[in-house]
Amino acid sequence: MTGAVAVTEIAPEPMSRAKTNIVFATIVLGMLMAALDQTIVATALPTIVADLGGAGHMAWVVTAYLLAEAVSTALVGKLGDLFGRKLVFQISGVVFILGSMLAGLANGMLLLIVARAVQGVGAGGLMVTAMALIADTIPLRQRGKYQGALGAVFGVTTVLGPTLGGLFTDHATWRWCFYINVPIAVIMVLLAARTLPRVRAAAKPIIDYAGIGLVALGVSALILGLEWGGQEYPWGSPTVIGLFVAAAVLLVAFVAVELRAEEPMLPMALFSSRVFTVCSILSFIVGFAMLGSMTYLPAYLQYVDGVSATASGLRTLPLVAGLFVTSILSGQVVARTGHYRYFPIVGTLVMAVGLALMSTMGRTTSAWLESLYMLLLGLGIGLTMQVLTIVVQNTVPYAQLGTATSGVTFFRTLGSAFGTAIFGTIYDNQLGPNLAGALTEARVPPSAAADPQSLRALPTEQATPIIDAYAKSLDQVFLWVVPIALVGFLIAWFLKEVPLRDSARAGAGDVGEGFSMPESSDRVVLLERAIIGTMRTARAEGPIGPMILADARSPLSRGEAWAIGQVHVRERVKGEATLAAIARAHKLPEEVLEPIYQRVVGQGYLRADGAVLWLTDAGAEQVERVKAAWRRWLDQRLVDWDNDDPVDRALLDAALGNIAAKLLEEEPREPELVPA
């Protein structure tokens, strides 16, 4: 992302608490749908395949969504800066509606995959603009609790997705996994039109179209080769080899373009940092194991254990519970101690153990034992996933903060896409011969084993060999991923322990971090998030406002400073300020605010020209003194962000200056609004 400061095309009045909550609800709807559709189809996949056919393409129902989302996320953030985030959020919502409708109406696997890709484009746009809109619309001082709530919503979708998918499949039709998005998205788009401010970047961003296009094509070719190999075509066929060669050429071209691009999507210089390289590889492995296993576990539970689609979603909860517990716990420990290195080491080892145990599951394995194995896998993923973004943000210079953060997230999404595809390739290659032998032994037609419902209707003696064939095939999937987890275990030892910035430690235990919620790629937004954590820690020592005013040597009370700040911000964005506008923005009667404004007018800091209030020279001086005090406070609290690079230092200075202005403007109104 560019470092440009966001400015408003039509500057809105500061929002009331009620309007802020409506805006937040709109943003939550976008994030909820985008996150939910990553996992909602997992429990419906066996039924979808039985209905539409094309079992060999099952993984692409998930992979197409993830790939499109990853590419969209890389592109849409810049488009939001160019055309305005509100417009891009609404367009993303419309694209998501179109993809959902097409997916629900699909009469073949190919159309469903295309529709899922369209959904992914919309979802990526919703997710990345949702994070940016939080920064645009929620005051800095209040943003921590809203980001925490958004993180909780994002985490809950991991539980809701498979369960909702199962409920729709069992009690309506799998098509409602997609139809359900349409009315919700329509409401979201209409709410966005009425409530969201129009915001764009002050500077025109530079978009790396060539880099984004090359990486999208290269990764797609590679996954397609892995998907088709041994299924559609032999591994040595010209088609599969051609896809691998094309992928290699496209990815080499991507690297060459990134080395020369003015603002590359993924700067190659980041890989000179061992910390970034290790964290990117581990993020890939975490995404690989997490979404790959969550996609195919419901199939195992439905075919082998014979449970319904709904029950298969509920039965995966131990994995999700383990992930949540260790994510939040490790975040709390990192926040208290500042040490993180051994979490990925232990986490990848526990992941490997969990996957190895899951590869032993079969028809006679008890539900409790299966739950224990899933819990172990979740515990390992949570231990590993939590710290990676924190570590990267802690080690890169400010100029690279946004690209490094989005890079780690990009690798996790790629890992999810590769994991789903490779899980599918192993599953398909194993299932074909295993199922053929089982059908011969059971003396039943292939249609009897096509879906879990048909399989459960067979007599036990006929169903048993088919169930064992599914169990053996899915066990091989989990077994083949064990070496991937062990590679992660070895790589994790190369993660260097560095002292965490105080701001990184303060935010490490946030709920959003615990659920590994996608981050904004805007470095100003990321710095503001770090400051939120720092302020939360500082408030434990006492109120910050009086300390700032004392440092500014200002005679103003907190209420007076707030009153002058409100006039200052309206002069800056509207050209003038009125008592009526300030009262209306804060849902207060003018009579409540009138005494304090009379006081600051009497003190000579403001002058009244009819209904309009203006800063006097004395008032402007107080504004600058308080703003400078905020800046000094930030410098003292963020001393560990210092960098010798003059370009990086200049960018950080500009960002901190803008944040100091925000803090002045947001000084809370509660103290001393009226004379005691």
Image: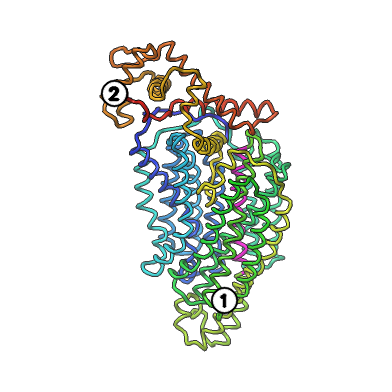
- The location of residue 559, given as percent across then percent down, is 38, 24
- The location of residue 465, given as percent across then percent down, is 56, 84
Q: Is residue 492 above or below residue 296?
A: above
The part of the image, by quadrant, that contains residue 567 is: top left
Residues under numbered marks 2 and 1 in contact, where contact means CB atoms less than 8 Å apart: no
Q: What label sits on residue 82 in the rendered view?
A: none
- Neighbour class for label 2 at 10 Å: few (<14), some, many (≥20)? some
Of the residues under marks 2 and 1, which one precedes in the sequence? 1
- Magenta stretch encompasses residue 170: no
Q: Which residues are magenta?
A: 401-426
- The residue indicated by pointer 2 is 580
Question: Could you tell me the amino acid type at mark 1?
Answer: Tyr
- The residue indicated by pointer 1 is 470
- Magenta stretch encompasses residue 423: yes
Judge by depth and name the residue closer to the eye, 549 or 74: 549
- The location of residue 370, given as percent across then percent down, is 55, 72
